[in-house]
């Protein structure tokens, strides 16, 4: 093959890769949505809200943390299930971001990752889940 | 700017002096760059004073922290009386202001050896370098760490408990050395364009680029190990924006190192390397902007909240980006470079492809991390998760592994036929094939993973073959690149095995009850209180298939100051896999204990779910009690009880024994349906009995329970070992390139001009 042919091949491969990367970007983008949009949705999204006091419970049999988020603006609530380590300072969080998708069976939001924001100067901590 | 009275003057004056001396040094070095030789002494002195002033300001902050001088806002915010000295030191870089100071601290220090390694380029290189330091200084003047409170609090607010970790003491400062080093190749590139003299820029910038690559890589490794071993995030890498912010400059730096290698050996890609040097520096600024400006506040709380410096950071990026764009646009064409005359199947092509692969990776990570900004103007801004990075990087890693497997046998001129290269690589490919067979036997199912394993192990083996050959020929000094590539092969295998083949299960263990998990058996033995050496922790006995027991101590404790619940995992590292125990929840249970109930004859009471009636004493329980008593023998008295439970009545007779000596015995009797009863005491005068119940109703003991996430991570140790080997290779290369630099400076002036 001539050098030109190699170059053309390289450019074609790069463009193909760019297309592949763009497609992957679009499918794995998790947009911020309202609770109403999250309910019944099928894609992975993220929701934010304040923790409803006293709504937290840990279900040992399912190894899941359950809690309710309240949207400070609309007042809507969302029941969230999170399977993972309860984040440090979870109870004092001023705002919690949950990333996951709606699980229609138990009718709750199944979060794979939580981001917890604290009121103090502690500029945030996070809990991740590696799957 | 704050009023004077609000500033801690020793520190603030040092910062202002640093600013003044940096401006003087800039002036001097620009003069020197313009050909005024007499400016050299002035510029050097100004730079020395600038360094001293920066050291002084860092020293002032350090002393304030050591003295726990809580009048200073920064000391108040990030430290406290209860902190041991090493966390007090870590408080230096726990906050935004202090981290800019430590960055500048390293930047100023690096300038000292830099001046000695640049020969005739001192003026322009140091001019640009000082400019980069000035950018940080402006931020520091704005974000002054020496602000004072109008009163002196008795105690500080303490350090974020998540940061109270030994890794916090070493990880951030190393990271900032890496950031500070990124300005060096940038300065070389800009100076070369400015003075239109690029003949030796690659030789001079190469060791610095390698040093930056090594130091930043070390910092990333430490961060990954920190996340894995103590923070209990479950993995060493989560593709979080903060992690990516350090990875992106490292990837660009890796591309630069390869480009400089090509330039040094083939005198090619000079222009591309200048662009790369710019990208390394700008990506450090961009990463800082992403994590410090608050733009990602809703996407990673790991990042710092907006402290009002986003404008400054955008300004810095615009300034240096604009300067670089201007110089590149106007001068890049003047840079002499050699056209590519190598054939397609040659070492050069492979290196270029590898560099493109690394750049693609850097670009993909940059775009992924910037997703919240890119989608900001869409209806719902969002971010991308780890699956994006994993999916997109897989083909890149495949390509890199393929190139690495063959590059040791490729020549520059491409004299060898493809068949000859294949023949030379055969032993390595055979090793790869063997490893793939083993992998398939151990459960690798995805065909892509099998190909990946084959290529990665082949790359490892062919490069190792080359290292061994060079070592035998006593040319180990030039084996740095190959050795680093052995490490890349190792790390690729580790990445794949630990991320695609980990097995995780969540269990809840009742204290004392073994639970089997696959071939292992786990028993939650006890919960240990805090002691002088350690925090509260659970003791879990893990019995392995060979019968050996590992006592794991996952920690779960509450920070005294903030009342945050903290967890640390317990990890058993082995050559083949890591067993990772991460605590999820601990409930102490309740010890239960006896419930006391006093009943007169024929009286009945409810306890738990049972109704108990006392029918009377049985003096004939074990021989006649009255006879035995007068004979001085042990006496036994039974209490006849009727226990009704769920509609069924049962008659039981617990016994109370006593001896003349005062010894008593009251063996408990089991009840049908659970629980036990015993006679605690006999009140002969009232004809009443005191019964002890255990395990009935609310008195039932609740065993302590520990919920764990148990993960088996295969070959995770290869990730660390791969990094060590990469660093060993990088260090070898750094030594070799630094030596060449010395040769460059030893040349007489005439020879230097020719070089």
Image (cartoon, helix red, strand yellow):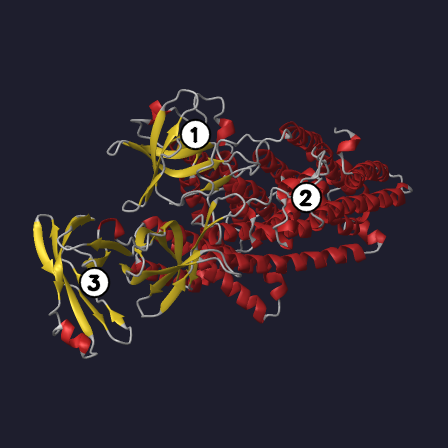
Q: What element carries label 3?
A: loop
Q: Is residue B142 positioned above or below B213 on the image? A: above
Label 3 marks a residue whose chain is B
Label 2 marks a residue whose chain is B
Visible residue check, residue B212:
no
Considering the image in quadrants, where does the N terminus of chain B appear? top right
Label 1 marks a residue whose chain is A
Visible residue check, residue B99:
yes
As measured in the structure, the alpha-carbon distance from the residue carrying label 3 to the one carrying label 1 is 63 Å
Q: Which of B591 and B239 is in front in this view?
A: B591
Q: How crowded is mark 3: few (under 14 residues within 10 Å), some or many (20 or more)?
A: few
Kindly identify the residue that appears in the image at 81 percent across and 36 percent down: B23
**Which quadrant of the figure has residue B493?**
bottom left
Question: Among all residues in the image, which is located at the extreme front?
Answer: B685
As measured in the structure, the alpha-carbon distance from the residue carrying label 2 to the one carrying label 1 is 36 Å
Q: Is mark 2 on a helix, strand or loop?
A: helix
- List x then y, in percent, for residue A18: 45, 34
Q: Is residue B661 positioned above or below B124 on the image? A: below
**Dot 2 or dot 3, earlier in sequence:** 2
- Is label 2 on the same chain as label 1? no
Cβ atoms under marks 2 and 3 closer than 8 Å:
no
Q: Residue A50 carries which label?
A: 1
**Which quadrant of the figure has residue B621?**
bottom left
Cβ atoms under marks 3 and 1 closer than 8 Å:
no
Kindly identify the residue that appears in the image at 84 percent across and 52 percent down: B750
Q: Which residue in the protein does label 2 denote?
A: B103
Q: How crowded is mark 1: few (under 14 residues within 10 Å), some or many (20 or more)?
A: many
Q: Which mark is residue B684?
A: 3
As measured in the structure, the alpha-carbon distance from the residue carrying label 2 to the one carrying label 3 is 84 Å
């Amino acid at each position: 093959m001539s050098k030109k042919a190699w170059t053309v091949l390289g450019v074609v491969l790069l463009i193909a890769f760019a297309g592949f990367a763009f497609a992957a970007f679009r499918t794995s983008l998790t947009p911020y949505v309202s609770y109403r949009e999250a309910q019944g949705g099928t894609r992975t999204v993220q929701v934010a809200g304040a923790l409803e006091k006293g709504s937290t419970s840990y279900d040992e049999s399912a190894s899941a943390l359950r809690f309710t988020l309240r949207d400070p603006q609309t007042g809507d609530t969302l029941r969230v299930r999170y399977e993972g380590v309860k984040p440090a300072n979870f109870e004092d969080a001023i705002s919690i971001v949950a990333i996951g998708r709606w699980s229609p069976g138990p009718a709750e939001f199944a979060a794979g990752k939580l981001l917890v924001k604290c009121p103090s100067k502690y500029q945030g901590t996070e809990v991740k889940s590696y799957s | 700017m704050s009023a004077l009275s609000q500033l801690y003057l020793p520190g603030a004056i040092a910062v202002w002096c640093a600013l003044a001396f940096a401006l003087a040094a800039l002036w001097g070095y620009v003069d020197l760059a313009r050909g005024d030789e007499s400016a050299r002494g002035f510029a050097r002195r100004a730079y020395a004073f600038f360094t001293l002033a920066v050291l002084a300001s860092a020293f002032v902050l350090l002393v304030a922290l050591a003295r726990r001088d809580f009048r200073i806002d920064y000391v108040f915010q990030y430290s406290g009386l209860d902190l041991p000295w090493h966390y007090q030191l870590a408080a230096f870089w726990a906050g935004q202001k202090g981290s800019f100071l430590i960055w500048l601290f390293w930047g100023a220090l690096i300038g000292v050896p830099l001046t000695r390694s640049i020969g005739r380029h001192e003026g322009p290189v140091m001019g640009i370098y000082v400019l980069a330091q000035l950018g940080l200084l402006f931020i520091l003047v704005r974000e002054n760490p020496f602000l004072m409170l109008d009163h002196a609090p008795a105690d500080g607010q303490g350090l974020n408990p998540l940061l109270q970790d030994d890794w916090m003491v070493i990880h951030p400062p190393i990271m900032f050395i890496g950031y500070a080093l990124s300005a060096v190749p940038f300065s070389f590139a800009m100076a070369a364009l400015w003075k239109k003299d690029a003949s030796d820029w690659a030789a001079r910038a190469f060791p610095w680029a390698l040093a930056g690559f090594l130091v930043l890589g070390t910092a990333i490794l430490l961060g990954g190990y920190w996340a894995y071993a103590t923070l209990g995030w479950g993995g060493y890498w989560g593709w979080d924006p903060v992690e990516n912010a350090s990875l992106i400059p490292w990837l660009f730096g890796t591309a630069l190192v390869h480009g400089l290698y090509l330039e040094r050996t083939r005198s090619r890609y000079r222009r591309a390397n200048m662009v790369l040097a710019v990208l390394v520096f700008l990506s450090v600024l961009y990463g800082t902007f992403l994590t410090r400006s608050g733009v990602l506040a809703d996407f990673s709380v790991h990042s710092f909240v907006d402290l009002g410096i986003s404008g400054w950071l955008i300004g810095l990026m615009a300034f240096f980006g604009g300067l670089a764009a201007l110089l590149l646009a106007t001068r890049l064409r003047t840079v002499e470079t050699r056209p590519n005359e190598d054939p397609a199947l040659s070492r050069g092509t492979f290196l270029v492809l590898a560099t493109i692969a690394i750049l693609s990776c850097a670009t993909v990570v940059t775009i992924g991390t910037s997703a919240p900004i890119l989608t900001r103007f869409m209806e719902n801004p969002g971010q991308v998760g780890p699956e994006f990075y994993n999916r997109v990087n897989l083909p890149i890693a495949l390509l890199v592994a393929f190139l690495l497997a063959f590059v040791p046998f490729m020549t520059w001129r491409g004299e060898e036929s493809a068949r000859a290269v294949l023949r030379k690589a055969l032993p390595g490919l055979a090793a790869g094939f063997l490893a793939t067979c083993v992998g398939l036997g151990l459960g690798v199912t995805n065909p892509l993973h099998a190909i990946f394993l084959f290529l990665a192990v082949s790359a490892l083996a062919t490069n190792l073959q080359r290292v061994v050959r060079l070592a035998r020929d006593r040319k180990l000094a030039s084996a740095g690149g190959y050795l680093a590539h052995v490490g890349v092969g190792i790390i690729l295998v580790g990445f794949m095995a630990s991320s695609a083949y980990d097995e995780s299960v969540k269990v809840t263990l009742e204290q004392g009850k073994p639970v089997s998990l696959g071939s292992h058996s786990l028993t939650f033995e006890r919960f240990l209180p805090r002691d002088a050496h350690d925090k509260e922790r659970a003791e879990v006995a893990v019995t392995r298939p060979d019968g050996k027991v590992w006592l794991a101590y996952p920690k779960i404790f509450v920070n005294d100051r903030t009342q945050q619940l903290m967890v640390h995992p317990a990890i058993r590292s082995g050559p083949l896999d890591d067993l990772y125990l991460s605590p999820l929840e601990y409930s102490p249970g309740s010890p239960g204990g006896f419930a006391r109930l006093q009943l007169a004859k024929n009286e009945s009471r409810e306890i738990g779910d049972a109704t108990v009636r006392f029918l009377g004493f049985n003096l004939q329980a074990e021989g006649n009690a009255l006879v035995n008593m007068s004979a001085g023998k042990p006496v036994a008295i039974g209490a006849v009880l009727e226990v009704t439970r769920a509609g069924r009545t049962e008659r039981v007779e617990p016994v109370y024994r006593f001896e003349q000596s005062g010894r008593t015995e009251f063996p408990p009797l089991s009840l049908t349906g659970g629980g036990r009863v015993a006679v605690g005491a006999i009140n002969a005068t009232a004809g009443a009995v005191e019964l002890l119940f255990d395990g009935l109703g609310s008195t039932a003991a609740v065993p302590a329970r520990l919920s764990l996430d148990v993960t088996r991570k295969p070959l995770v140790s290869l990730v660390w070992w791969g990094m060590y080997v990469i660093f060993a290779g990088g260090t070898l290369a750094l030594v070799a390139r630094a030596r060449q630099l010395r040769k460059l400076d030893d040349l007489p002036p005439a020879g230097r001009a020719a070089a």
